[in-house]
Amino acid sequence: MKATARARRAGLYIRISDDREGAGLGVKRQSDDCHELAERLGWKIVETYDDNDMSATNRRKKRKGYARLLADIESGHVDAVLAWHPDRLYRQPRELEDLIDLIEANEVDIKTYTAGDLDLSTPTGRMHARMLGAVAKYETEHKAERIKRKVKELVESGAIHNGGHRPFGYERIFEGTGPRRKVIEDRINEAEAKYIRDWARRALEGESLYSLVTDANSRGITTSTGGAWSYQGMKFLLSSGRIAGLKEHKRQVVGKAVWPAIIDEEDHKALRTLLSDRAEQAKANGAQQSSTALKYPLSGLVRCTCTEDGIRMKTSPSSNRKGPVYRCPPKGDGGCGGRTIRIEDLERLMEKLLFAKLEEIEPLDEADPDDPRPALEAKVVKWERRVAELKEELLDGDRPAREIQEAIDTLNSRIAQAHRESAEYGIKGRVLEVSAEELRKAWEDYLPARKQSVYRSLVKEIRIHPATPPKNVWNPGRAEVFWR
């Protein structure tokens, strides 16, 4: 649409997709140039619409300034548009087509500081705009591909990536100032690293992530951004390769990193296995496990003998006001529905049995000759090598794909089981490093979830037999303990 002599009520749209200079300087530069253009044209800028640090190609982020401009064009509040360059308005072909329809329907002029008229009222003008849009889209996609390739190279080299928040447990050392500054080193923040080591140790001893999160937030320990800890945040931290000095790409370890480790690789592998297994177990057991584990140390270990395999008993309030009980599920859920045992009585009994058991076991002060982990690690290396070979065969296509995939799945199951057995032994070993006397002194200060971790490392299950007359008298013989 050609400009006429009458004054135009112009809407100024300015956008910069990557404000690396900070303080909106790129937006200000566009604004100054376009105000100069408006003065030359004799147009009055009645409204300014800006989207600072906002890409036109990111469809997940709404350009609020651009949306307001379109609404004001449709309402007639503005009848002309000023922009620094056409690609400030659009970089997606579909956006251009919507803009063409709106401009034609409302007889709006568009002028740009760097490219002159953007005439969308003629076939030639629309063709030119579409060509510019296609070039802009190509440049955007090409830039994205270069960035992806650069990130991949950084990952594979173990280098530090400049983006994102400061990682918890590390201090960032920068070169330069402002948004263009570059991270040259990640150093361990000892004040935070001590928490990571403590949380890792407690998690490896079996303490739940919910317990760690509750404890951290109650003590006022915040994340690197100053927020409260969440279950997912704690899980992400403790299962990350970063804290073991490893570089990851899409949550897969790809090699050593240049920053120092806070925990060792062995603990990292054990944590990943344990946290993955706990997530699967939580799904299988339902929501009660995570909440009751914080309150009752024996939760998940108590089973009723009414079935051959022993069905897990759940916590329940007592009907006679004698305190909460473990109760067998109703018949409709596979249990007997009637058998109960008072939680307080069972916990008191298990504490006595636990300390008696620990007194029978000598604390581990040197390497255990029966440690299964070296043999398990050797098997894992062999199986992983075979999986890699099978994947190559899968690409060759000489054998049936289903047959090869079944073999890969079998080996992956063996690898996962070996990691589980290694992690379980590690938990038990940590408990056995402490004498019964030392544990007894610390026991009262332990949170329920930490007590549970000790029980789980030594107790396979506790089977509850039927009550015998007189039923109102506590009979410790009803509880049969199966030790690991």
Image (cartoon, rainbow, N blue to C red):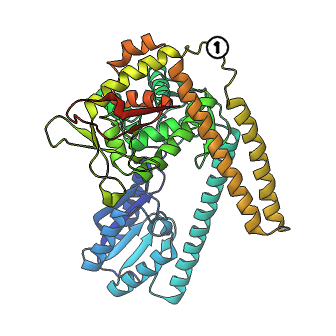
> Which quarter of the figure is the N terminus placed in?
bottom left
Residue occupying the far left of the picture: 321
Q: Position of residue 409 (x, y in %)?
A: 68, 57
Taking the spot 44% from the left edge, 68% from the top edge, the residue there is 89
Residue occupying the far right of the picture: 398
Residue 220 in sight from this viewpoint: no
Q: Position of residue 326 (x, y in %)?
A: 29, 41
**Quadrant of the rendered structure where residue 332 is?**
bottom left
Q: Amino acid at mark 1?
A: Glu
Seen from the viewer's position, the closer of residues 191 and 354 is: 354
**Quadrant of the rendered structure where residue 212 is?**
top left
The residue under label 1 is 366
Disc 1 crowd, CA 10 A, few/some/many (<14, 14-19, 20+): few
Taking the spot 19% from the left edge, 34% from the top edge, the residue there is 472
Residue occupying the far front of the picture: 469
Residue 71 in sight from this viewpoint: yes
Q: Is residue 334 left or right of residue 389?
A: left
**Quadrant of the rendered structure where residue 291 is?**
top left
In terms of secondary structure, where does tag 1 sit? loop
Q: Can you say whether 152 is above or below 295 in the image? A: below
Q: Can you say whether 166 is above or below 412 in the image? A: above
Q: Can you say whether 128 is above or below 262 in the image? A: below
Q: Position of residue 186 (x, y in %)?
A: 56, 28
Q: Is residue 390 left or right of residue 278?
A: right
Seen from the viewer's position, the closer of residues 300 and 67 is: 300
Taking the spot 79% from the left edge, 69% from the top edge, the residue there is 400
Q: Position of residue 363 (x, y in %)?
A: 55, 14
